[in-house]
Image (cartoon, helix red, strand yellow):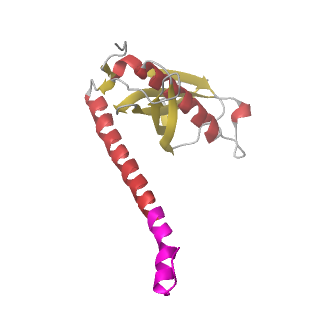
Amino acid sequence: MSSTPSSRPTSVTRLSLSHITAQNETNLLGTVHGGVIMTLVDSVAGVVAARHSGGPAVTASMDEMTFLVPVRVGDVVHFSGQVNWTGRSSMEVGVRITADRWDSVGPEVHVASAYLVFVAVDSEGKPREVPQVVPETDEDRRRLREAEIRRSHRLARRAAIVASREEEAREPESAAEDAGGDVR
């Protein structure tokens, strides 16, 4: 019998992390390097996925990362993550990134959003089942609906790519047949 519950509410595994940016994290433009933000996003999302699934989970894809405004040195960057959707062994984790200045009081600015897909794995690295996420608020239900749209787009994109590759593999065969050649 598994000790993992069949479902978990969204609030149980939410995570927030704050990070003060430093000079050594800047890019050539003098703002915080996007890779620094992406690393912190993956770390937050990984903890959320592991907590939700009750064990190890690995990043399968970063479905989308949208940077809205640059992050500056000295900004306090806040990462808020939660599970938006669950499948059998996979889950989408959304991370919202905001920032404010370390030395002044002012409104937080939404600087980026990211959506990552994680797969829960067992001790042998094989996919394992995850609890289904239970949305609790209207915002959670919106996130679930939008995650389902992203998932359908991922699946459609994957199917289109596979079909394109299969078509490309048939083209040399068709060209040889059209030319009257023997295809072997």
Q: Please give left or right for residue 12 compared with residue 19 in the image.
A: left
Query: Who's the residue at 51% across and 77% down the image?
Result: 183
Q: Position of residue 44 (x, y in %)?
A: 52, 26
The overriding secondary structure of the stretch rendered in magenta is helix
> Is 170 inside the magenta-drawn segment?
yes
Q: Position of residue 129 (x, y in %)?
A: 38, 26
Q: Please give left or right for residue 61 compared with residue 143 in the image.
A: right
Query: Who's the residue at 72% across and 32% down the image?
Result: 23
Q: Is residue 101 above or below residue 69?
A: above
Q: Please give left or right for residue 139 compared with residue 103 in the image.
A: left
Q: Nearer the viewer, residue 122 or 30?
A: 122
Query: Who's the residue at 46% across and 85% down the image?
Result: 178
Tell me if residue 86 can be seen.
Answer: yes
Q: Nearer the viewer, residue 100 or 142?
A: 142
Badge count:
0
Q: Is residue 129 above or below residue 166?
A: above
The image quarter in which residue 24 lies: top right
Q: Nearer the viewer, residue 182 or 26?
A: 182
Query: Who's the residue at 30% across and 31% down the image?
Result: 139
> Is 114 inside the magenta-drawn segment?
no
Tell me if residue 98 can be seen.
Answer: no
Q: Is residue 168 above or below residue 175?
A: above
Q: Nearer the viewer, residue 105 or 38?
A: 38
What is the span of residues highlighted in magenta in the rendered image?
Answer: 165-184
* Quadrant including the N terminus: top left
Q: Is residue 144 above or below residue 124?
A: below
Q: Please give left or right for residue 51 compared with residue 140 in the image.
A: right
Q: Position of residue 47 (x, y in %)?
A: 50, 22
Query: Quick one: which residue is furthest to the bottom in this view?
Result: 180
